[in-house]
Amino acid sequence: MPNWIERLLADIADLITRTKGLDDIHDDLVAVEVSQVAYAGTVTGVVAAPKFQCSGLVGHGDDYFKDFWAYVVWDAAGGGAQPQGQILECTGYDSAGGDFTVAAFAPNVIAAGDKVLLIHPSLAYMLNLTPTRAGYLDELDFDLQGALSTIAGYLDTEVGAIITLLDTTGVVRGARTTAAKREAGVLQIFQKTWDGRFGSGAGSDALFTVNAQDIIVEKLIVKMTSVDLTDDDWDGISVEDDYATTPHVFIDATAGAKANLTINAQLAWTGAVLVDAGQAIQATAIADDANEDALITVYIMFRAVADGGFVT
């Protein structure tokens, strides 16, 4: 069944409730099979005004549709001009040609492409359906269409906003709020680039500072880029937290020896270390600094012990 018929019948049922308060009729109408009370057709020609033809409604037997009401649901010219919304009683029907006889629609005649609904006289009587009330139906139908159009506009806006959040694989970027990302136990990832203390001599630089709540570090990765650091004047690097007593070492001097600092090399640590809020994770240049900007990137994966923990 076409959607516009479903919508019209729903409009009729709603109109009963809204204008007559006949809830029992409303319930009966909703339960009736559409094929028993209404037929949908598209005007395929105007035989001899005021007759019109619906080739899709042939073969029902002469005068089968006599006393049915022809309601013009949609005017093919667009814009909702009459005869859309008008209703006339059928006074004759020719089965072979699908020809319907009605009084003339005015001021505009019915034309090919118009959509009509043929309504059984019993249903028309039950609804007290008249041209005036048909106008109410048409007005209600337009109201509903306007509401649906507005809703569709809202949906388009919302969908467009969601699409802007998707990356090329369809994954939503930034789908969680900052607070949600910092909830206790939620995995967080952060990274910093380090120059290897280029020009500053041996020593340590704080890379990550723990804020608000303690964190548990689970993974740490040191990635070299396009700079070969194996022939620099230093001995290498290490990465550790900055506790004055018993610091926790993630990348020790052996793993970070300069012989291992080749182009695109990666040094990785996996485990579990609790770092208190206010402490930092630092990178150390051993014996000297890098001879050039080292362009080392350090990544950490961690979870806050309580809501609100993060690193900068």
Image (cartoon, rainbow, N blue to C red):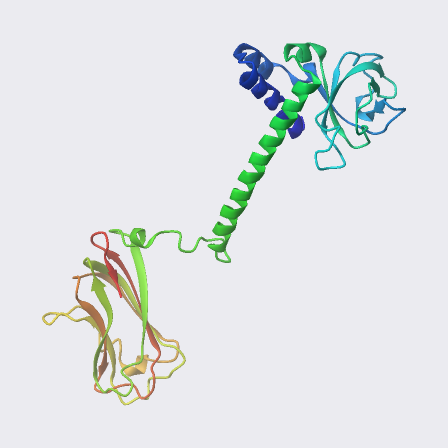
Residue 220 in the image: state x and y as whole percent. 28, 66
Please name the residue shown 83% across and 25% down the image: 55
Location of residue 284 with respect to 84 vertically, above or below: below
Task: Identify the residue at image location x=84%, y=15%.
Answer: 93
Give the vertical position of 153 relative to 11 (above or below). below
Please tell me in which quadrant of the rendered image residue 188 appears.
Answer: bottom left
Would residue 205 appear left or right of 89 to someone viewing this image?
Answer: left
158 sits to left or right of 76: left
Callout count: 0
Q: Tell me the quarter of the image containing the N terminus.
A: top right
The C terminus, quarter of image: bottom left
- In percent of width and height, residue 104 lies at 82, 22
Vertical placement of residue 70 versus 236, above or below = above
Residue 275: image quadrant is bottom left
Q: Which residue is at the far front?
A: 107
Relative image position of residue 283 (x, y in whole percent): 24, 75
